[in-house]
Image: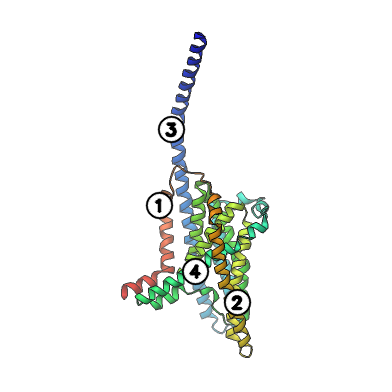
Amino acid sequence: MIWRGLDEVRRIMEYNELNESNNSQLEPNSEQDDNAKLKGYKIVCAKLGLIMCVYFLCRLAVGWVSSLIGRVFSGLDGNIFGLISGILVILFVYIIPLLFAAFIFKSFSDYKGNYRSLYRKPRRLARALGTFPATFGLGHGVALLTLLASYLITRFLDVSAYIDDLVRPTVIEPTTSLAGVFAMIFLMVIIAPLFEEFLCRGIMYDALKPYGTGMAILISSLLFGLMHGSLYMLFYTTAYGLALGYIRYATGSLFIVTILHAIVNSIGAGALLLTTLMELTSEANRYVNTVYTIFILAILVMIIVGVAVFIAKIPAIRKFKIENSWTQIGPWKKTAWFFASVPVIIMMVLAFNELAGNLLLGILIH
């Protein structure tokens, strides 16, 4: 018994010595791995900043080229000019930034032969589509809060002219012709969901995912919001991005988020069509006004129901926790490293100039 006990003690001591030896070897490696991962995260943040810089410069290019065409071809038919403008938007706002993002992240080679799985239908498609009321309610609830905040600001500060330009819902502005309306609807319902989801919930999300799924959802949603070019759209599209990013994580597919994005945009497209008909029609104006009123009331009901559904789903959302694959650095430090990146700083300057420059100037003047 004594010898057996001593033998057991000896084995335990050898086991502990072996563990201590392994730990002493692993600790430096673990620290090196963390440093390498932090370096990789900084590189990803810089690349995301570059993508957004290219995006904002492309938005400026659309305005410059359109203005140049308007001056050179002053007698150009409005429908033809609208078609050219639409082509310019597709090229500069969607295709060029997406190709640039795919190039610097080498995403097309990574996704090669994998598009079918990337756009696979979720196992519970009906349940995934059932998230639409909560998604719609969250996004448009934030939109209403933005309009309320802008109203309160104009009550206390004399910046109403700047607020009107910045936070009004530009998505439903009427255009000069039905041809232009249908071109805009095509962009909103087909082109925008396909390109924006592949860029934001595809390339950007996948690039950030190794450094924490929560940060991947948060940063890709913020960039998605900045891409929409106004303070009004910034807040509610960021909220939409958070919901779509969560659904992308839960389903592992771009299929459902692209469909949901298209459905949301189709509602805005319906409002665009009705407002344009009210501008262009005379005899049927009364009927168009009636349909428009019913449509807007239906949207308000959908928002109320959607907000209620979202609140009801909060307990289930809390239970379905997002896994964090990189816990060595907290979310605040990750956020700080993101905004400390030089390309991201340049991106924020470009976004600031487009989204809020005139607002701050107006506040300073008054």
Mark 2–mark 3 distance (CA, rounded to whole Å): 63 Å
Front tag of 2 and 1? 2
Looking at marks 2 and 3 on the same chain, the residue that comes earlier in the sequence is marked by 3
Looking at marks 2 and 1 on the same chain, the residue that comes earlier in the sequence is marked by 2
| Camera-nearest residue between 225 and 132 | 132
Residue at the image point whose x is 54% and y is 50% from the top: 319
Residue 143 image label = 4
Mark 2–mark 1 distance (CA, rounded to whole Å): 43 Å
| Camera-nearest residue between 344 and 264 | 264
| Camera-nearest residue between 312 and 191 | 312
Q: Please rate how many residues cluster around mark 1, counting C-alpha atoms within 10 Å: few if below 14, some from 14 to 19, many from 20.
A: few
Model colouring = rainbow
Identify residue type, mark 3.
Pro
Under tag 2, what secondary structure? helix
Under tag 1, what secondary structure? helix
| Residue 102 visible in the current orientation | no
Q: Which residue is mark 2?
A: 295
Q: Which residue is mark 1?
A: 336
